[in-house]
Amino acid sequence: MKFCPNCGEQVKREWKVCAKCGGKLSAQSEPSALTCAGCGREVEDSWKVCKSCGEKLKGVGEPPKKEDRVGGSKNKPIFIGVIVFLLVIASLVFLFLAGVFASVEEYESESSDTPHCVAPYIQVGSKCCLDGDGNSICDEDEKSPASPTSTPPTSPSTTVVHVTETTVKSITTTSTLAKSSACGYPQGSAPTGSEVVTLIRDGAWSQKILGWKFKLRALSRSNDCVKKVYVDAESPLRRKPKCEVTWEDPCVFSDSEIEVGLLSAEASSATLWFDFPCTTQANPPSGSTVLEVDDEVFRSWNNYSFRIIDVLHDGPLCITHVKLQVREGGQPHPPVIAPSWSISAKLDGMDVGLVKVYDEDSAEIWIKP
C-alpha cells in the first residue's frame, strides 16, 4: 500500500503524481519490506495479523498522521498575532472614551461654577451685581460708602399672641423679607394676605394651612448663592405635589391654586410665601383674646369652653365658617355658633370670630367681651 507524502491520500504504486493534491510521488513513497515482530517473517502492508503466528501487526496499512504531513502544522503564530492586535485596539478605545468623559465632567464643573446673570444684572468675577443705569458698572460701586453711624431700616413686623388656657406664647412673623444682596437678587415682598413661612431642610413638615403641609426638600446653590429651592406639599387628600421655586419665578402646586414664592434663603433654610386662593387668617380686634380650638376636647376660656363640630366650605379648598359648640359651666345643651372671616358670632354679650384655620379639625378664634 502506498500513500501520498503531501496529503496522505492512498495512491497506486505505479502513479507518479497524486490524483488528489497533484504532488509528485517519489520512489521513497514505496514502503520498505515489513517483518512480523513475533516470528520475523516478511509480511505485506495490507495485513492486519501475521498469517504465520497470528501476531497483530502495528503501523501496517495506516496512512501517515496529520502532524507528519507536509503543511499539516498549526498556524499558532498567526493566531497569537490576531489576539495581540485586538488587545491593542481595545486599549486605544478605552483611552479615547476615558478622555471624552473627563472632558464632559470638566465642562459641567466649569458650567456649574459660572453664574448666569439676567438683565439688569451683570457678571463681575464669579458674582452678579445690579446695573440699573446700564453703564456696565455695579450700582453698589457707584454709591458712596455708608456712614459708620447709619442704622439700616428694619422691616415691619406683626406680633400675634396665642392664649391656650394658662399658656401664653408670642410669635413674630415678617411680611417683607430681603433676598441676599451679595448674590445680586432683587428685593421682593410677599403678596398681601399670603402666609410667610420659614422652612428648614430637616425632613419635617411645617405647620398646616387649610389642611396642607409643606417641607423643604433641597436647595440648589452656585458659588454659595442659592439659585433654586425644592418644596414638597401634602394635601388633605394625601396627594403630594412638588414645586421648584426660583427668585424670578414662583410656582403653583398641581391640583390646587396655591402659589409659592421665595423671599430669602440660607445654607439649609428658606423663607417663602404661600398664597392661597381664599382667606386663611385675619387680624383679631384690639382687646380680644386668641384661643386655639379643635374637635377633640373643649378648650376653656373664663367660664366658657369651645369645641369644633364642623366647618363650611366654599369650594374644595376654602373654609368660610367654623361651627363651634359653646358650653358654659355644666350646661346640658350647649349652643352652636358659626363665625366667619368677615362676620363674628354673638354669644351672651360677647363676640367670637376667626383668626386662622389650620384644617377641618383645628383653628384659632378670637373672643372679645
Image (tube, rainbow, N blue to C red):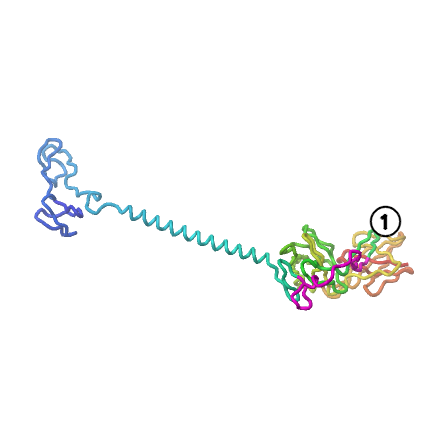
**Residue 4, relative to residue 270: is it above or below?**
above
Horizontal and vertical percent for residue 116? 61, 62
- Does 307 sit left or right of 17 as displayed? right
Pick whichever, 311 or 267, lies toward us. Answer: 267
Q: Secondary structure at mark 1?
A: loop
Q: In the current view of this chain or complex, which residue is farthest to the right?
A: 349
Q: In the current view of this chain or complex, which residue is farthest to the top?
A: 39
> On the image, numbered disc 1 is attached to which residue?
166
Residue 15 is a magenta residue: no
**What's the amino acid at mark 1?**
Thr
Horizontal and vertical percent for residue 103? 50, 55
Quadrant where the N terminus sits is top left
- Does 202 sit left or right of 161 as displayed? left
Magenta residues (range) = 129-158
Residue at 44%, 54% in the rendered image: 96
- Does 283 sit left or right of 132 as displayed? right
Image quarter of residue 208: bottom right
Dominant secondary structure, magenta: loop
Residue at 18%, 43% in the rendered image: 64
The answer to whether any part of residue 258 appears in the image is no
Horizontal and vertical percent for residue 356? 79, 59
Image quarter of residue 216: bottom right
Quadrant where the C terminus sits is bottom right
Pick whichever, 221 or 315, lies toward us. Answer: 221
